[in-house]
Image (spheres, rainbow, N blue to C red):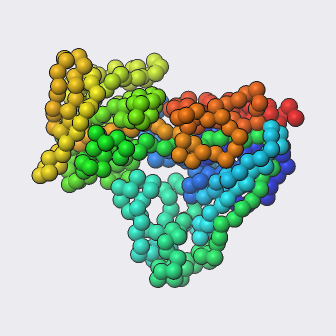
Amino acid sequence: MTDNQAAARASDSILVVGGGISGLTAAIEAAEVGYEVFIVESKPSLGGRVAQLNQYFPKLCPPTCGLEINYRRIKDNPRIHVFTLASVSKVTGGPGAYSATVKIAPRYVNENCTCCGECAKACTMEIPNEFNFGMDTCKAAYLTNDMAFPQRFVISKKVIGTDDAKRIADACAYNAVDFDMAEKTMELSVGSIIWATGWEPYDATKIDNLGFGRCANIVTNMMVERMASKKGPTDGKILRPSDKAAPANIAFVQCAGSRDQNHLEYCSFICCMASLKHVTYLRAQYPDAKVTIFYIDLRAPGYRYERFYDAIKQDANVRFVKGKVAQVDEDPATKNVTVTVEDAVAGNKMRETFDLVVLATGMQPTAAIAKPAADLKITPEGFLVNDFVKGGQFAAGCAAKPADVVSSNQNATGMALKAIQTLASR
């Protein structure tokens, strides 16, 4: 069951905050053993960061591989209730008897929507495409992505009061457009809560010496992920933003913001493997391209990741340089980027120029930016701390620690069990 259909239930139920891979896993595991589950997701559709990936470990499969089956299980399970464009504004009570205040923002499209796309065709207004990290634009009447769940368009609030509003409404043959929608508030009574609020890419503009936003051809790892996707802003090609040219010489800067007392003091766990994966994207698209990876330490946790790393090291066109990048500069004429780095092995300063530089930006917990309105222990970095003695509320996936998809799923299954134990013990 999807989208704002359910009324508040009795306390023998579970609230899952966040509809990314961890939240979906926890919700499905709990619902399929008989518990009522509410998913509250702040975005217009489920899927979280996984939905934005081109491929993910361990099998390097596309997001549809994992999300499609989860969406089907949610759709077929009447115990799961999904609220999108929603947030938890307040939590009161204790284990076994929580009251959660949920605010639901208007979508301006109701359940009559068939995803015919006529509203987008009628719309002339363009807005930054958040799903593609602003690398392109989309219509102000849009579907978040092709595999969005629920499959329902969204209309930007910016359309209201413009000529586009009438054009969009007139174009819809199903009376699905409703500009009278307003924010709604509801109360949910639940026995336990799983916080699967996920992560945000660290804001690279805060890392002054690495030039993001100042140099046209410096991008982040998640931007590369979207470029590599055939449904992304460049139709699957990794290109220089300045001139849309194919890069022949690419640098990766590891620990961009991570392991840095001025930014994120911890290791973000996923960045090294993400960069190695991106090398495979580039080498497949550009067989003659040269890649340099500047790193402090490389982390390949586990046998399977070690084998992946070993395979990359055998590529003669890939070079690893141990050293921290100190500065980047842009050539005003060519927009090429010169990287200055201390080579820790050779003991000298290097200055090399590249067509494209990719920053392996770190993973910042969403709770560091938007603190949950609940009685939770939170580290100074923004990670939620599980209090298993007190029980009742549990952090899953990247809300608790930096993790990859596999680890997040495993952890979410465990937190679903903890949430169930809270209910069973009451």
Is residue 7 placed above or below 352 in the rendered structure? below
* Among the 4 quarters of the image, the one containing residue 263: top left
Furthest toward the left, the residue is 333
Count of marks overlaid on the render: 0
Give how far across and how far down residue 76 sits, in percent. 70, 50
Say if 385 sits above or below 166 in the image. Answer: above
Image quadrant containing the C terminus: top right
Viewer-side residue, 419 vs 308: 419
Q: Residue 187 or 370: which is nearer the viewer?
A: 370
Query: What is the quadrant of residue 399 in the picture?
Result: top right
Where is the N terminus found, in terms of image quarters? bottom right
Q: Is residue 128 left or right of residue 12?
A: left
Left or right: where 27 falls relative to 308: right
The answer to which image quadrant residue 300 occupies is: top left
Q: Can residue 258 be seen by looking at this rendering?
A: no
- Residue 392 shows in this picture: yes
Place of residue 265 in the rendered image (x, y in percent of width and height, measured from the top left): 45, 30
Residue 302 x/y as whole percent: 47, 19
Name which residue lies at 19% across and 17% down: 346
**Position of residue 3 in the picture relative to residue 379 (left or right):** right
Q: Relative to residue 210, is residue 248 drawn left or right?
A: left
Residue pictured at 64% horizontal, 54% vertical: 87
Residue occupying the point 47% across, 37% down:
363
| Residue located at (61% from left, 66% from top) | 106
